[in-house]
């Protein structure tokens, strides 16, 4: 997401010449290229023009500090304006009802059902809520079954009325069920519909009027680009929704919808879907997104993802083992699992400032750990606990059992030993304690290349 835009903006800032002051002459070509970059990213034309006009107005005549180049000052101004463009502040869900009700609306194929599951899981795990999902898509074949499967995977109940074709009735009864059984959030999954389908638009309006939801969320596929903005406007005119959800931001999207939609419908983007896993849902932070667009990374989100996997008792146990040089392959495997739970590896790496551009053309397979896991799982419990006993014959057996070769096994064990020595060296320092409290990147200092 935003890779091309980030690259184009970086090139644009390099155009800016001159020292001491930003003038209309030296900024004109830069902002012309910035506007072109925004348009190429599928940003609404009026939004792009207003954006560059505002940047120009704020930039003109600003004195440039001795330690700052004009291009650096312009980057800051563009960053601030991008943040404003996308909403300035993070918009929280307003869940005040008993139960609170969230209504999903959007086009066919936008990802409403999957997002309903993701949102339910997030509310359950991070907000300590007790959600109930309501299957109100009575048109799409297997829509109800899809929601039930998701519910079973996450241990979240789904309310359904087999044979009933009235989504208003189903939604109302789901809320009554929630009141009776103590669920504090009801997520209403509805059918996809076109804004030009008057009958279907009347239906979603009727559902909203009947249940008076705390939140009405418009779910839109970010890959539809500028069409997403136009559709959002049409839905908002009918539903007056509370916020937008952008799905599939991990796909080959140019990002224009994220930059335009807030301005066009004057409603905040509340969540983004960033992958296929049910945990791949993030609150939308305008400032952090501006950081990522300008190639500054998103270290705050990276730390938050790490903290979600942080277990204080486990960290203390691990720190004691490291101090005694008892860190073993069981601990190593545990750290791998924590990192995998944090999300897509390339997305995680791109959150580190300066790394996103470096790995832009590098494919990082989410299955990169499979070879390492296979090797560790081919060890006996005794071998995992006592890596010192891994002699030549044991390594040959492990290689055969894991479907790798002896070189792969030797490389992993060597790098494991290096990691353990490094941990032992720093464990008494503040840095060592901090490292023990954070999920480790297994295979440091260098990951083994396993086929």
Image (tube, rainbow, N blue to C red):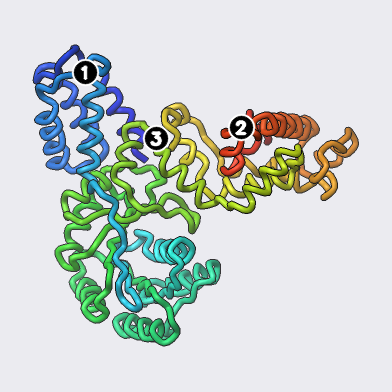
Image quarter of residue 197: bottom left
Question: Residue placed at 16% from the left, 26% from the top?
Answer: 32
Residue linked to disc 3? 297
User: Which quadrant of the figure contains the N terminus?
Assistant: top left
Mark before the other along the chain sequence, 3 or 1 = 1
The answer to whether mark 2 and mark 1 are in CB contact below 8 A is no
Q: Nearer the viewer, residue 14 or 415?
A: 415
The mark nearer the N terminus, 2 or 3, is 3
Q: CA distance from mark 2 to mark 1?
A: 38 Å
SS for tag 3?
loop
Q: Position of residue 268 (x, y in %)?
A: 24, 54
Neighbours of disc 3 within 10 Å: few (<14), some (14-19), many (20+): many
Which quarter of the figure has residue 91? bottom left
- Distance, label 3 to label 1, CA atoms, is 25 Å
Residue 429 numbered tag: 2
Helix, strand or loop at mark 2? loop
Q: Camera-side residue: 309 or 108?
A: 309
Mark 1 element type: loop
Residue 65: mark: 1
Q: Nearer the viewer, residue 172 or 178?
A: 178
Mark 1 is surrounded, within 10 Å at the Cα level, by few (under 14), some (14 to 19) or many (20 or more) other residues, namely: few
The answer to whether marks 3 and 1 mark residues whose Cβ atoms lie closer than 8 Å is no
Rendered location of residue 255, percent (x, y): 30, 43
Q: Residue at x 23, y 51 (%)?
A: 227
- At a point 76% along the width and 48% down the height, the residue shown is 377
Residue 113 in the image: above or below residue 52: below
Asked if 85 appears above or below 391 in the picture, the reply is below
């Amino acid at each position: 997401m935003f890779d091309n835009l980030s690259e184009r903006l970086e090139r644009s800032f390099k155009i800016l010449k001159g020292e001491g002051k930003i003038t209309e002459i030296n900024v004109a070509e830069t902002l012309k290229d910035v506007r072109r970059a925004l348009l190429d990213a599928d940003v609404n034309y009026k939004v792009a023009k207003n954006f560059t006009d505002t940047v120009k107005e704020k930039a003109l005549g600003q004195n440039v500090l001795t330690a700052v180049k004009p291009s650096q000052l312009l980057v800051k101004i563009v960053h601030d304006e991008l943040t404003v463009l996308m909403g300035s502040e993070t918009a929280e869900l307003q869940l005040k009802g008993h139960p609170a009700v969230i209504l999903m609306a959007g086009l066919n194929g936008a990802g409403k059902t999957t997002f309903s599951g993701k949102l339910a899981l997030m509310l359950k795990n991070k907000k300590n809520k007790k959600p109930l999902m309501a299957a109100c898509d009575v048109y799409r074949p297997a829509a109800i079954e899809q929601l039930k499967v998701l519910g079973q995977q996450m241990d979240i109940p789904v309310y359904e009325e087999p044979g009933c074709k009235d989504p208003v009735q189903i939604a109302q009864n789901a809320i009554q069920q929630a009141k009776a059984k103590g669920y504090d959030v009801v997520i209403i999954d509805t059918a996809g519909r076109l804004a030009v389908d008057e009958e279907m638009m009347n239906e979603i309006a009727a559902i909203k009027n009947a249940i008076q939801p705390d939140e009405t969320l418009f779910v839109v596929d970010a890959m539809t680009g500028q069409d997403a903005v136009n559709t959002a406007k049409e839905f908002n005119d009918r539903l007056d929704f509370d916020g937008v959800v952008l799905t599939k931001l991990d796909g080959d999207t140019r990002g224009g919808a994220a930059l335009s939609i807030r301005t066009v419908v004057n409603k905040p983007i509340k969540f983004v879907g960033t992958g296929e896993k049910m945990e791949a849902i993030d609150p939308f932070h305008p400032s952090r997104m501006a950081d990522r667009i300008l190639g500054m990374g998103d270290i705050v989100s990276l730390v938050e993802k790490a903290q979600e996997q942080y277990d204080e008792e486990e960290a203390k146990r691990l720190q004691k083992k490291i101090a005694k040089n008892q860190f073993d392959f069981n601990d190593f495997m545990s750290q791998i699992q924590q990192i995998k739970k944090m999300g897509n590896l390339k997305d995680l790496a791109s959150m580190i400032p300066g790394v996103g551009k470096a790995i832009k053309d590098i494919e990082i397979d989410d299955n990169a750990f499979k070879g390492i896991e296979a090797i560790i799982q081919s060890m006996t419990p005794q071998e995992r606990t006592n890596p010192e006993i891994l002699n030549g014959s044991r390594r040959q057996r492990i290689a055969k059992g894991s479907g790798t070769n002896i070189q792969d096994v030797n490389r992993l064990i060597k790098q494991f030993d290096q990691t353990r020595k490094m941990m032992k060296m720093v464990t008494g320092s503040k840095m060592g304690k901090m490292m023990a409290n954070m999920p480790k990147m297994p295979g440091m200092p260098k990951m083994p290349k396993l086929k």
